[in-house]
Amino acid sequence: MIDFKFHVVSLIAVFMALAVGILLGAGPLGGAIGDTLSSQLQDLRADREQMREELSSVRGDLDGTNQFLEEGGPQFVDGTLDGGRIALLAVPGTNGNDIEAVRDSIVAAGGQVVSEGVLTDAMAEVGGASDRAEIASNLGVEVQAGTDAAVPLGDLIADALTIGYDEDIVLDGQGEDQLLVESLLSADPQPVALQNQPDGRADAIVLVTPRTMPIPQIDPEVDEDEDGTPDAEAASDERRAALILALQTYGAMAAQAPFVVVGAAESEWDLVGLLRAEPNLAEGITTVDSVGEVVAAVSAPLAAAAAIDGIIDHYGFDDGAEALVPPPVPAPSETRPLAPPTVAPEAPSGGQS
């Protein structure tokens, strides 16, 4: 056992070391340590000031670039959609300013927004399968047993907005296209909430999505392990299922008409990001990332014009982008025949990936 003498010696050694440290710190080492700390502090202050100046310069350059694009954007896109008719859609949670920016850019490009609306929650909720089945049944849409009605409903929505691709249907606003639109507007619940009756059929559909999708939240009453602890994996699986269902729906729409998704690709929960990571979920879709920024608004009509011309690609700065800017294409006209989109044999390259 450790005896009392050992404790006494240990305490004496501790106090001696403390005394020596105080004497050295207040004496010969004090000045050197103080000078060193003072020099390091000055260096840190200088580095902070330099970083502040660099950040201010970068912000100034970025503001200047955005201002340049805002002022020059209408000139950059002028005429690219001359005569092009666009159905502008959004999903719940999309920033209204982002929708407005894309709309303004389409108009500046000489395009016409012939219909505008929102794909409702009834089209996106995993738990809404029964509602979608009821909508499909009321609209006379056939749904295979054991499958979700979201995909055939997406097909129907695209038909209603762009039914002009069917050469057998007269585009007088009073034929089958009008009946489809009226059916969609009267459905309960509505798969798509249109602001008004479409002003004619669209040549392409542009869908604007949120800047970022919410991270999955754990519901303790539903997402629990056997031991009662929250199950983060179950919450993630549920959110992923909702995103996959949405992408499959968009894929059905893209099979009917040129389809452009403007959104974000910064995380695994962003629609554009997931679409680019797993393109087999929805083939034939053109994407534009960086929604909420000027570049996305400028690229949207250019991408729509390219999609109408049969070019399908991914544009922007984030992961999965194949080109920075959509390529120039001939502007659509009233006389040029339109056809459902197909993947171009040689997609433009040279952008970031």
Image (tube, rainbow, N blue to C red):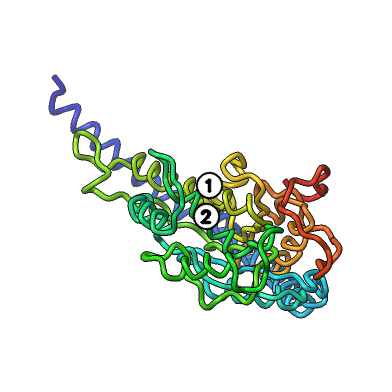
Q: In this view, does 269 lie above or below 11?
A: below
Residue 353 visible in the snapshot: yes
According to the image, label 2 marks what residue? 154
Residues at circles 2 and 1 in contact by the CB criterion of under 8 Å: yes
Disc 1 element: helix
Q: Quadrant of residue 172?
A: bottom right
Question: Looking at the image, is mark 2 or mark 1 nearer the viewer?
Answer: 2
Q: Quadrant of residue 315?
A: bottom right
Q: Where is residue 158 in the image (x, y as percent from the top left)?
A: 58, 59
Q: Position of residue 86 (x, y in %)?
A: 67, 69
Q: How far apart are marks 2 and 1 (CA)?
A: 9 Å
Seen from the viewer's position, the closer of residues 141 and 117 is 141
- Residue under the image location 53 percent in, 47 percent down: 248
Disc 2 element: helix
Residue 32, which numbered label?
none
Q: Where is residue 176 in the image (x, y as percent from the top left)?
A: 58, 65
Q: Is residue 213 above or below residue 64?
A: above
Q: Position of residue 32 (x, y in %)?
A: 56, 53
- In the rendered structure, which amino acid carries the disc numbered 2? Gly
Seen from the viewer's position, the closer of residues 217 and 45 is 217
- Residue under the image location 62 percent in, 42 percent down: 279
According to the image, label 1 marks what residue? 248
Seen from the viewer's position, the closer of residues 56 and 303 is 303
